Amino acid sequence: MATMLRGGALDEVLAAPMELSDATELAELLQALGDPTRLRILSALDMACVPVGAIVAATGLRQPAVSHHLRVLRDRGLVRAERRGAFIYYCASSGALRPAIEAARALLDARGAR
């Protein structure tokens, strides 16, 4: 439960909100994560780098749709592409994705959404 602040403590907290540039960057990242298909793709990339064809097979989506979602994730720095011979493999760009998704799940649990 949150603490109720009054007087000087409240003024101190309200005087230091997140910088607008930080909030904008974070909102763009969260927007990319806010799509169920992208979360499914990220969960597939959590353990290994995989080729686009494997993502298409795992999600049941058409290749152009998967490519679109991968581009959004790549543009936000969430995945990276690696050429391996004739194939392009996609990998999660950070090990921080799993804890972030687990934190979001904990928020769902805390609000009784599950």
Image (tube, rainbow, N blue to C red):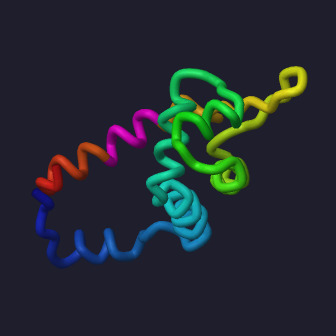
- Residue at x-position 24% and y-position 74%: 10
- Residue at x-position 14% and y-position 60%: 2
- Residue at x-position 52% and y-position 29%: 46
Residue 98 locus on image (x, y percent): 44, 34
In the picture, measured across the screen, residue 34 lies left or right of residue 110, that is right
Q: Mainly helix, strand or loop, the magenta region?
A: helix
Residue 97 locus on image (x, y percent): 49, 38
- Residue at x-position 57% and y-position 69%: 24
Residue 103 is covered by the magenta coloring: yes
Q: How many marks?
A: 0
Vertical order, 108 against 101 (above or below): below
In the picture, measured across the screen, residue 13 lies left or right of residue 58, that is left
Quadrant in which residue 84 is drawn: top right
Residue 63 locus on image (x, y percent): 69, 47
Residue 109 locus on image (x, y percent): 17, 47
Q: Nearer the viewer, residue 38 or 27?
A: 38
Question: Start and end of the magenta stretch?
Answer: 98-104
Vertical order, 101 against 49 (above or below): below
Q: Which of 84 and 91 is in front in this view?
A: 84
